[in-house]
């Protein structure tokens, strides 16, 4: 039997640790954007298939060298490109232990500690998010799989109510499921419908306002006539504007119509931890299922997400994988695989448990409130600059920006694209681009745990400077 000597393990892991520490200690001083694009990174890695092995220490050094210039900086204080948390050091440390322990969290006998920590962390999550305490929680990769899992439970339950067992008999010959969804639902919800055989284009789309919120009156008219079986999908935190649907009105109406209500709350669900933002999410606790990420405001490392389902039996019917060689949980035992699509999977609960223990309710609340304040700070500075328009109500952590707003639409599109490119080239901060209401915009998502008011102010000035540079360059070229 080939064994790795303990001293070799120690040297390898110390080497990896040194490289990881060096990256994290220097991330605030790196350019916010990668210094190589995909094509350049591919050239760095392309090689013929190795016919023989290499020294592990050399392999790790080579990996660090080849990857470095193509690394993004979501762990830094001025990354605003997407809603990506900062991978808190405690979560990373717990995740390193998870990798070293090598636990397969497929069932409670294969990994007792991993199963137990999920049980405790699940209870904590329900309390933090103030969701029904009887709900079941699955630890998934992220909101994408959380949406798939929740909608699988929804599909199974609404069909069961009309006498069809979709888990056993599939969709061939099944009654048609009506899916009602906001026109600005996140793309991962449509992906879930696609994967589940419910279709992306067979949905009833509800009209929305200029922030992506579902218009209440037309929605109520649709819901009053919805047939059975039916699923309604609402949103907590629009990816561009941060807007929330009116759960207090729409959830009761949908449930009164007999529909299953699912809430996609990848980052918006965390608004419930603070009195400053919880009003945005009032009423969503009345839904049947929820999707939320841990690798956003909880700051766990990738990958980490949660699916929450009020009806545990519906959840388990949709997800349980049974075989004679797999254990059956006893009284009071929780089998992690009964709540997720995977049998073999990472023990994600350790990092979640460690982060909640480290931050506590007060620490998580502080992070959310700080980031919302930073978003308002950036928006406030940008609003003072002629030609820059903030397009959304900055109620949460999202800022939606248009440059050249005082110019014709096509020219504003050009100026917006050029400003985003200039911001990334300058390297102070990283921002994202999108199309909103048919026009080019810049979007900022403030969610990294190291972002504070000073970093937000520095970033706002860098954005204004980049915009002015684009205008000056355009003037020099006569445009």
Image (tube, rainbow, N blue to C red):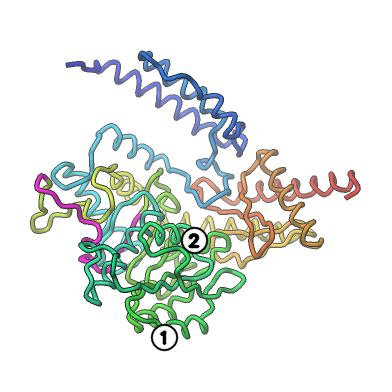
Q: Does the magenta-highlighted stretch encompass residue 172?
A: no
Instruction: Please tell me whether residue 30 is drawn above or below residue 361 in the rendered image.
Output: above
* SS for dot 1: loop
Nearest the eye: 169 or 336: 169
Task: Quadrant for residue 176, please give it.
Answer: bottom left
Question: What is the number of callouts on the image?
Answer: 2
> Would residue 133 be found to the left or right of residue 89 on screen?
left
> What mark, if any, has residue 428 been given in the picture?
none
Relative placement, left or right, of 321 versus 48 is left
Q: Nearer the viewer, residue 229 or 415?
A: 229
Q: Quadrant of residue 262?
A: bottom left
Determine whether the residue tagged by mark 2 lies in a helix, strand or loop.
Answer: loop
> Above or below — where is 175 with respect to 152?
below
The percent coordinates of residue 17 (x first, y second) are 40, 27
Relative to 346, 330 lies left or right: left
Q: Is residue 334 left or right of residue 403?
A: left
| Disc marking residue 186 | 2
Q: Which residue is mark 1?
A: 225
Q: Which residues are magenta?
A: 306-325
Tell me the residue at 40%/59% (across/down).
Answer: 192
Q: Position of residue 208 (x, y in %)?
A: 56, 73
Q: Residue at x 30, y 34 (%)?
A: 99
Residue 345 horizontal/vertical position (percent): 27, 43
Instruction: Name the residue at 40% across, 17% down.
Output: 50
Report the Cα–Cα distance between label 1 and label 2: 25 Å
């Amino acid at each position: 039997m080939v064994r790795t000597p303990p001293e070799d393990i120690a040297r390898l892991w110390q080497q990896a640790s040194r490289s990881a520490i060096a990256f994290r200690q220097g991330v605030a001083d790196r350019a916010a954007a990668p210094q190589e694009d995909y094509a350049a990174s591919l050239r760095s890695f392309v090689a013929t298939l190795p016919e023989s092995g290499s020294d592990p220490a050399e392999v790790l050094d080579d990996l660090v060298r080849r990857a470095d210039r193509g690394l993004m900086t979501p762990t830094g204080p001025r990354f605003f490109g997407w809603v990506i948390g900062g991978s808190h050091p405690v979560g990373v440390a717990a995740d390193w232990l998870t990798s070293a322990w090598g636990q397969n969290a497929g069932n409670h006998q294969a990994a007792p500690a991993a199963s137990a920590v999920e049980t405790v962390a699940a209870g904590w999550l329900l309390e933090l998010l103030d969701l029904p305490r009887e709900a079941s929680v699955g630890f998934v990769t992220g909101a994408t799989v959380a949406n798939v899992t929740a909608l699988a439970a929804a599909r199974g339950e609404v069909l069961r109510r009309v006498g069809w067992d979709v888990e056993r008999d599939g969709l061939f010959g099944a009654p048609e499921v009506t899916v009602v969804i906001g026109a600005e639902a996140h793309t991962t919800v449509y992906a879930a419908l696609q994967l589940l055989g419910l279709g992306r284009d067979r949905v009833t789309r509800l009209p929305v306002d200029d922030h992506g919120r579902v218009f209440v009156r037309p929605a109520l008219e649709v819901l009053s006539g919805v047939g059975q079986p039916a699923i309604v999908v609402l949103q907590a935190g629009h990816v561009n504007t941060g807007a929330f649907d009116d759960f207090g009105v729409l959830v009761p109406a949908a449930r009164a119509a007999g529909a299953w209500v699912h809430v996609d709350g990848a980052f918006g669900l965390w608004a419930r931890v603070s009195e400053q933002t919880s009003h945005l999410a009032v009423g969503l606790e009345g839904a049947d299922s929820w999707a939320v990420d841990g690798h956003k405001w909880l700051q766990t490392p990738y990958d980490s997400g949660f699916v929450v389902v009020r009806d545990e039996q519906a959840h388990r019917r949709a997800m349980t994988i049974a075989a004679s060689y797999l254990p059956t949980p006893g009284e009071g035992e929780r089998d992690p695989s009964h709540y997720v699509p995977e049998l073999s999977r990472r023990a994600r609960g350790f990092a979640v448990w460690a982060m909640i223990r480290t931050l506590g309710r007060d620490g998580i609340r502080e992070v959310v409130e700080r980031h919302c304040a930073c978003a308002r700070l950036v928006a406030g500075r940008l609003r003072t600059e002629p030609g820059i328009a903030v397009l959304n109500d900055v109620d949460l952590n999202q800022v939606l920006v248009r440059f050249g707003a005082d110019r014709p639409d096509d020219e504003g599109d050009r100026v917006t694209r050029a400003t985003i490119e200039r911001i990334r080239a300058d390297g102070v901060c990283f921002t994202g681009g999108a199309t909103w209401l048919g026009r080019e915009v810049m979007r900022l998502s403030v969610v990294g745990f190291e972002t504070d008011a000073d970093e937000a102010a520095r970033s706002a000035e860098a954005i204004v400077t980049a915009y002015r540079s684009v205008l000056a360059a355009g003037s020099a070229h006569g445009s």
